Image (tube, coloured by chain):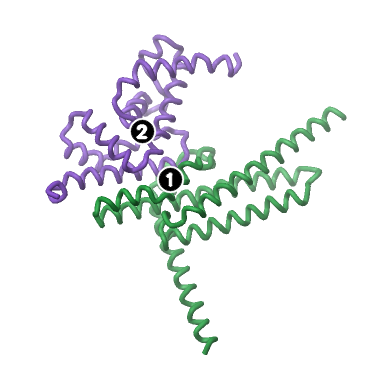
Chain colours: A purple, B green
């Protein structure tokens, strides 16, 4: 089977993932975290129950990998201001206590696992740097001295 | 008198340059993705940074946003983070182009018909790029990435140009090889 024939089902699986699953996630960072969570930590392979039921495991894996990389580059290209808004939206969507959320994210840096394997090193560094800054900004905004202003 | 003052001026400039270099070196050593941290495999590291991200790293837009927050701590944090990313980009660009040039030199050594003008043009562009990278490495530590917006874009254009010329060279060499194989 040649590459051109293979690409069609991958595109279908990608569209399916976009329309059925990712459209329900309210923000771009949420979509990125979701896609990263479909990757097995031990093998680096992607798996999605719903996609596998409609497409072959190989096609589903490829579609998830592409969607993950695209979501990553999209979030990495955000200006700091947009990233702060998106992170705030993600934080609200988790329904966790904002202070606890910010403390955990600053300490554990869970966003690091959201980086796909085959991405540019500088972009990966820009992503972690921007998330760190966005967290610091949200924390700063929560400080009583700042909210009194 | 003029001799003494110019020597003094020269010494001060040299000292500033050395300090800038040391500062940049120490910052780049503390990059999270250094030798001890997680590094993607060789092929990924060689991939050049997309131009829109180069523009973003050196743009002043985020600094304007940070400045509006009126927090000196946040501003310091931002400048430190962005300088580290900018230095990583300089290192990655230098390493990537050096690797590409290494491959090209290897290919030229095996090639039978080398055009001197093309080789000289590639070398000059490569030398210019290396010089720009060295200057950037120094200036990022001294002035901050936001004030250097035009220089990285020039470096990026040069990098793309070198890659295009080398790509053309490789496809030309391949075509000549195929023609040679067909005629023999």
- On-image quarter of the N terminus of chain A: top right
Q: Which mark is residue A114?
A: 2
Badge 2 marks a residue whose secondary structure is helix
Residue A67 occupies which quadrant of the picture? top left
Residue A26 visible in the current orientation: yes
Q: Nearer the viewer, residue A87 or B25?
A: A87
Seen in the picture, residue A75 relative to B31 is either above or below; the reply is above
Q: Nearer the viewer, residue A122 or B72?
A: B72
Q: Mark 1 points at which residue?
A: B56
Q: Which of marks 2 and 1 is in front?
A: 1
Residue B103: percent from the left, percent from the top? 65, 44
Q: Which of A108 and A91 is in front in this view?
A: A91
Badge 1 marks a residue whose secondary structure is helix
Q: Which residue is drawn at 42% across and 32% down?
A: A116
Within 10 Å of disc 1 (Cα), the crowding (few <14, some 14-19, many 20+) is some
Residue B108: percent from the left, percent from the top? 73, 45
Give the residue furthest to the bottom: B1
Residue B105: percent from the left, percent from the top? 69, 47
Using the numbered discs, state the Cα–Cα distance from disc 2 to disc 1 in whole angstroms: 21 Å
Q: Which residue is drawn at 40% across and 52% down?
A: B84
């Amino acid at each position: 089977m040649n590459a051109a024939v293979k690409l069609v089902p991958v595109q279908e699986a990608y569209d399916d993932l976009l329309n059925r699953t990712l459209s329900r996630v309210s923000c771009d960072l949420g979509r990125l975290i979701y896609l990263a969570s479909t990757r097995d930590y031990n093998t680096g392979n992607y798996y999605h129950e719903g996609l596998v039921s409609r497409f072959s495991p190989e096609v589903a894996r490829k579609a998830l990998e592409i969607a993950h990389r695209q979501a990553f580059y999209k979030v990495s290209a955000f200006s700091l201001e947009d990233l702060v808004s998106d992170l705030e939206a993600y934080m609200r969507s988790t329904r966790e206590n904002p202070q606890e959320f910010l403390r955990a994210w600053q300490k554990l840096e869970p966003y690091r696992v959201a980086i796909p394997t085959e991405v540019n090193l500088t972009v990966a560094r820009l992503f972690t740097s921007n998330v760190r800054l966005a967290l610091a900004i949200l924390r700063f905004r929560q400080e009583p001295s700042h909210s009194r202003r | 008198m003029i001799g003494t003052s110019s020597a003094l001026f020269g010494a001060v400039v040299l000292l500033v340059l050395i300090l800038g270099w040391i500062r940049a070196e120490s910052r780049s050593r503390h990059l999270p993705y250094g030798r001890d941290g997680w590094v993607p495999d060789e092929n990924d590291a060689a991939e050049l940074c997309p131009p829109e991200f180069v523009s973003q790293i050196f743009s002043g837009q985020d600094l304007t946003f940070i400045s509006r927050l009126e927090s000196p701590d946040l501003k310091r944090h931002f400048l430190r983070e962005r300088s580290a990313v900018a230095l990583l980009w300089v290192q990655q660009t230098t390493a990537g182009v050096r690797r590409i040039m290494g491959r090209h030199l290897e290919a030229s050594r095996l090639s039978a018909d080398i055009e001197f003008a093309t080789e000289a043009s590639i070398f000059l562009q490569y030398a210019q790029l290396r010089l720009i990278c060295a200057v950037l490495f120094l200036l990022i530590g001294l002035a901050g990435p936001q004030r250097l917006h035009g220089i990285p874009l020039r470096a990026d254009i040069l990098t793309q140009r070198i890659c295009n010329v080398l790509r053309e060279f490789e496809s030309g060499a391949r075509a000549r090889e195929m023609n040679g194989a067909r005629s023999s």
